[in-house]
Amino acid sequence: MSSLTLPDPDRAVLARANDIAKQLRRLVPDAVVISDREGRSTFECDALTAYRRLPLAVVLPGSTEEVSAILRFCHDNAIKVVPRGAGTSLTGGALPLEDSVVVCLSRMTKVISIDPENRVACVEAGITNIAITNAAAVEGFFYAPDPSSQVACTIGGNIATNSGGAHCLKYGVTVNNLLGVRMVMMDGEIVDIGGSHLEAPGYDFLPLITGSEGQLGIVTEAAVRILKEPEGARPILLGFDSTEAAASCVAAIIAGGIIPVAMEFMDRPAIHVCEHFVAAGYPLDVEALLIVEVEGAEDEIEYLLEKIEDIAKDFLPTEMRRSQSTEETALIWKGRKAAFGAIGQLSDYYCIDGVIPLSQLPKALDEIGWICRKYRFDVANIFHAGDGNLHPLVLYNANDSVQLERVELCGEEILKLCIELGGCLTGEHGVGIEKRELMYEQFTDEDIDQQIQIKEAFDPSWLLNPGKVFPIEGRDARKLRGHELHVLESGIAEGHEAP
């Protein structure tokens, strides 16, 4: 859906936009300031592309000091700010408002230092996830969290949503690999939280910042843990004639005391699409496929793979095939990493991100299939099976407003199912606008009030990424100590109201 379908802003809005852009150019002459309509339209949405809005202006700073000057200016002039990395958010987390300035960190890509002795890399927040590993690889190290979008997504965005990835089962997600951040507060103050070493003095605020979705400040630099590359690693493909058998096998492997470095699930539709796209060598005669990877010395790898095969036999796999070479391993993972792009070539899809206990995997997959059939949609299931982070891809036509409304209802029902099964709303994509009203399904009014108090402690004027995360319904009733919270209307595209 093109932004050209939206009405042009009135002259007063255009005049304000031009004035803000002019002042920003004077304030940060070395930054890139975008004010023309065509340039701003590049930033009108994130990967949740059904909803679009043009910001007043876009500024791309090149340093923490420039970010500080920009935020101080916006704070003093009561201008809303939407932080942005690569725009790969799948929940509308980087969706701008029409009266906001987008601060995009994509120019801030420096590797500040790689310290193998202390196992830490210090980088700017606009660097891509894969670039950190590439930089550390020179010293024989790597950065563990590896989202499927790792070639594009930035470490700042990873911190904002606490991103995971295929290889996080063993090493943990972003919060488990983050040592420190430099962050700019809404009033322009620069603060350092944590440090560039394993243990920092004082309160541990990093878990509070990680996953805060740009609501508390803008992270401009990060110190992350890097790990020594393993001696070896090898995946095994386990094919099953039912999704239930594959899901049960996942829980059994973990219960057997084995923590693979990765354990990924793909159902038949996903297998066929990815195989056609990449030719990874996936079996095409199975209903579900597990990619289970272990690492270590060769003897350790052999021992673990034998144990996994013994456990898998109880679930009657139709195929068990170990990778025989580094080339075959690379192809197996290339197919998995390309899954979203491969499916996107065939159809629009609505990617749902929820988490469930491993013991509920068989029931969850059965219920997800039933829900999608009820709403008359096909679904491809691809997810991080080892930690129960589901990613059903519901296939629909984004240009059909009726289907768009129906697919949102479908996604809402799937997320409610995750909560009912003892899970939660999000594993790594965040809440954004997509799930904000569902927060009441997960939390009580008191829980949400506590979270709002934290937001207000960092950003009392509600200028940072407003309209995201917190439910709009019920805010006025709670009054929130007299603050006027901004109702997000930027989720409207062609007359369709955002979730």
Image (spheres, helix red, strand yellow):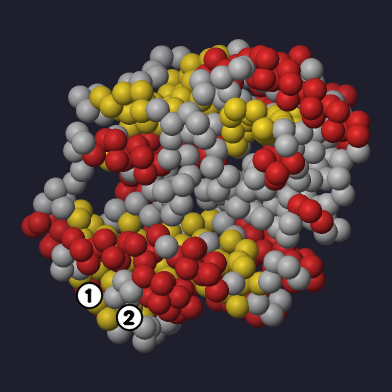
Depth check: 164 or 30 in front?
A: 30
Q: Earlier in the sequence, mark 1 or mark 2?
A: 2
Report the mark closest to the observer, 1 or 2: 2
Q: Residues within 10 Å of mark 2 (few under 14, many from 20)?
A: many
Depth check: 463 or 63 in front?
A: 63
- Residue 50, percent across and down? 71, 58
- Residue 329, percent across and down? 24, 63
- Residue 147, percent across and down? 43, 50
Do labels 1 and 2 touch, CB within 8 Å?
yes
In the picture, measured across the screen, residue 345 lies left or right of residue 247, that is: right
Question: What residue do we see at 57% from left, 56% from top?
Answer: 353
Query: Which image quarter: residue 484?
Result: top right
Q: For mark 2, what is the residue?
A: 283
Question: What residue do we see at 83% from left, 45% from top?
Answer: 489
Q: For mark 1, what is the residue?
A: 321
Residue 165 can be seen in this image: yes
Q: Is residue 240 above or below residue 405?
A: below
Amino acid type at mark 2: Pro
Amino acid type at mark 1: Arg
Residue most extreme to the left: 299
